[in-house]
Amino acid sequence: MGVCASKSEPKKVKKQKPQSVTMPPQQTLTTREHKTTTIQFQEPSTIQRVTSSLRRASPNQSITPIQKVSQNTVTTPVKRVSPSNHPTPKTLIIQSTQLQERSRNGSMLSIPMQRLSTKPGSKSIQSPASRNYSVVSRQNHKSQSKTVMQHNETGQLVLVEMIKFENRNQQFIDMLDELRLDQMHIVKILDIHMDSHKRNHQVVYEHCQGGPLSKFLDSNQLEYQTIGSIFYQMVEALAYVHSLGYSHDELTIDSFSVFDDSSTPFIKLSEIRSIYQFMYPKDSILYEPPNSPNHHHHHKDHSKLQSIQTKNRSQSNDIWALAIIILQLLTHQFPFEIEEIHKFKAEQVYAEQEQDIYPLLIEMLHHNPNERITLDKCLLHPYLIKMKQVQPKDYILPFSNIIKSKNMTYLHKCLFQYLLSLYAADHLKVLNKLFTTADLNKDGSLSEDELQPLLNEQPQEYSLQISDFVNITQEEFLLFAADKQLVLTQDCLTLSFKALSKSQSIITPKLICKVINDCNEEKLQQDFDTYNLNYTLQQKEYEEFLINYQSPQPIL
């Protein structure tokens, strides 16, 4: 069922002399530690970054490790597939080559492709984000510096944060280069642009289309099982941050957003800057534990509290705040008045609660921070182990899509792999989570035992058989389970035809292989012959062939 049959070597890029770039003036750093860096750019080939051997310690580490930076460690840019095929001058796309991704992950589809992915050691793209993105909305965000934008070619929605050239902001940009968060329940940074004219950085984040968690809570009556699933995802995200020696310390319910709400909500930690710098968000004091120095002021007016906040870094702060957020999801209110926080004793308030979530919350809400359960131990708690288990309803549509895709030709597989990676990357991320959750033994395929609980509770109108899915691999699952209608829109079909045809108005097996490196030209030619494609595909034939993927017919 796989697609890949051959590999092509990446093209060699001609090296040019490095050009120095003047960065905004650096002044005394105000938070964390000083660091010294020397930055060099090579355009448009490779990018080298020489960093001092002293690495900044995380706020929760007492010893600063010393690491030497290898001069051979470089990130090779890849030419982005674009219908225009005309790269923008002075725009650096920092991305690992497809072969490097394949060697790490096994396939482009195993981990959904990020088109514009910055890597450690890379720096800002020397052009404004507006060259690649158009504004969709500046609404629904508390900070006016954040804007929802859409990629001009793929239609992908992103969130762009405008950050002025200021001392504290420049420090944040440097920190982003030093600590890259890579966890499925934490929003990823896709690009960092620099607009010298407007004197600001533009950080491009994944966009969570479901909006902040508080908005989702207001418009949905969450089931108990759904809250448990959200709880587990939150703990996973923050446990990863803690494992790196960091903490968030400013969690609120709106630190999390809904990335996808098609079935069980897919949650992401969306406000991540506090991991790098204190941001003093509104209402964060409401989520601080009793030992916070801010609670000694006892102001009922929260705006007054904001002006006198003091902060201390501690992973135990996150554990308390997370428990308060879960109580909000359960009860739609705070468990106490802020001025009464010292009287709040979770072990007394929830002693008679019968739901199995409360014993864990009680362990997270000890007043003494040293007595609070760690997030690593939370993941081993019987309640969260149960919440980690899959919800069968989430798999019905993906499995139905697999049945619809069983007659796809090799040509279909190549084209849909390309289309999904390019235009439905967010959808693939959700499918990837479903697969990794179901793959209990982590062998990269689904066995009969792993499939059994997924299909036991299917609705009566479905008649899915386990035998149709046994031993399906991760790559096959992502390709066949995807909703093909997402990429069969007229815009996607028109843009992809232009890219695959190299603007020649026809598509041939050879042209396909030039754009999609992993395709086998001989197998493509066999499909062209079988389905009467006459060695070339015009746009109308291309669209018709893709739309009829469920039951391919020769073109007449």
Image: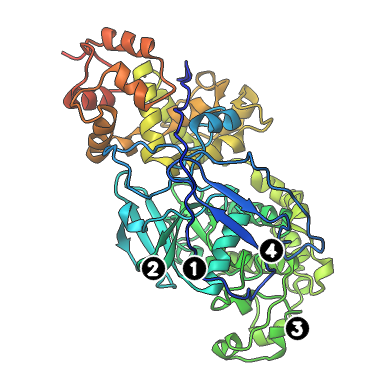
User: Mark 4 or 1, which is nearer the eye?
Assistant: 1
Q: Which of marks 4 and 1 is nearer the N terminus?
A: 1
**Above or below, 136 relative to 492:** below
Q: Position of residue 376 (x, y in %)?
A: 76, 53
Q: Position of residue 530 (x, y in %)?
A: 28, 7
> Dot 3: within a 10 Å radius of its alpha carbon, few (fewer than 14), some, or many (20 or more) residues?
few
Report the disc number at residue 497.
Answer: none
Please give left or right for residue 361 compared with residue 78 in the image: right
User: Mark 3 or 1, which is nearer the eye?
Assistant: 1
- Say which residue label 2 marks: 140
Task: Say which amino acid is labelled 3.
Answer: Lys
Q: Which of marks 2 and 1 is nearer the N terminus?
A: 1
- Say which residue label 1 marks: 24
Q: Do the residues labelled 3 and 1 touch (CB within 8 Å)?
A: no
Residue at (74% x, 50% y) in the render? 67
Please give left or right for residue 425 compared with residue 237 in the image: left
- Say which residue label 3 marks: 343
Disc 1 element:
loop
User: Mark 2 or 1, which is nearer the eye?
Assistant: 1
- Say which residue label 4 marks: 247
Disc 2 element:
loop
User: Mark 2 or 3, which is nearer the eye?
Assistant: 2
Q: Distance between the residues labelled 3 and 1?
A: 49 Å
Q: Which of marks 3 and 1 is nearer the N terminus?
A: 1
Task: Say which amino acid is labelled 2.
Answer: Asn
Q: How far apart are marks 4 and 1 (CA)?
A: 28 Å
Q: Residue 230, located in which quarter of the rendered image?
A: bottom right
